[in-house]
Amino acid sequence: MGLGGAPAGPAHKWGRAALWPVALVLVCAGGNAASAQEWKLSTNISQRMLYSDNLLLNRRNEVDTFGSITTPELLLERTSPTSHIALNGRFEFEEYFDHSEFDSQDQILDLDMEKALSERSRLGFDANFTRDTTLTSEEDVTNRFLDDAVRFISWRATPSWTYDLTPLDQIALAGTYRQVNYEDTDEKTDFQYFGPTIDYSRK
């Protein structure tokens, strides 16, 4: 596993790059057309109001404001006797009264896939793409308070293999890669993370 800096890519390319989970779902779904399968599409929209007396958690510049967060959500699932695919897209629109400089439009995509190789063995793939805005310093590796809203792009991919040793015992091998790039700021540090995991569980 490693931790280090990563050059931030141009922000205007995020949209084209974010299409890869959709393409991956279509490729995996194009298996045996004769096999029984079920498609399911779910939609949801929510809205919540909020008030913060220190939006940025900043000692020097306390910003008190009311705001609203509107979140449309879309979930596409495909299930067959040997596989399951779920693609979830969430889009958050945040607006703050009298403080439009903190408004944001964020996108979050989650992809989960599982394919049975046999009665005991199966492959899995979990991926996430996030283009988000943070207003707090809670995860700031520089340990400093923020003066402005900070936008970032995050990628994560985790392939895995699971094997049932017995009806009660299970072993899983996985690898994780994550990359985070912050846009137009020196208050946070870009980073990459990768590493393997081995898990054993007993029901």
Image (cartoon, rainbow, N blue to C red):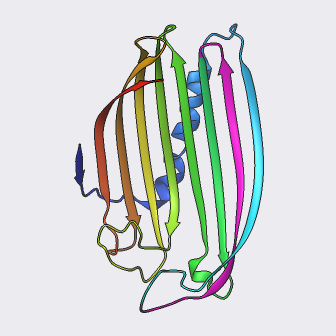
Q: Where is residue 69 in the image (x, y as percent from the top left)?
A: 69, 68
Q: Where is residue 54 in the image (x, y as percent from the top left)?
A: 54, 84
What residue is rendered at 49% in x and 76% in y? 149
The answer to whether 77 appears left or right of 198 in the picture is right
Q: In which quarter of the image is residue 159?
A: top left
* Magenta residues (range): 60-82
Q: Quadrant of residue 92?
A: bottom right
What residue is rendered at 67% in x and 22% in y? 79
What residue is rendered at 36% in x and 69% in y? 140
- Looking at the magenta stretch, what is its main secondary structure? strand
Q: Which residue lies furthest to the bottom in this view?
A: 60
The answer to whether 188 appears left or right of 3 in the picture is right
Q: Where is residue 35 in the image (x, y as percent from the top left)?
A: 68, 9
Query: Is 184 covered by the magenta stretch?
Result: no
Query: Is 69 covered by the magenta stretch?
Result: yes
With respect to residue 149, does 82 lie above or below?
Answer: above
Total residue callouts: 0
The answer to whether 43 appears left or right of 202 in the picture is right
Q: In which quarter of the image is residue 28?
A: top right
Front position in the image: 116 or 163: 163
With respect to residue 2, does 149 lie above or below?
Answer: below
With respect to residue 120, does 131 lie above or below?
Answer: below
Q: Where is residue 89 in the image (x, y as percent from the top left)?
A: 64, 47
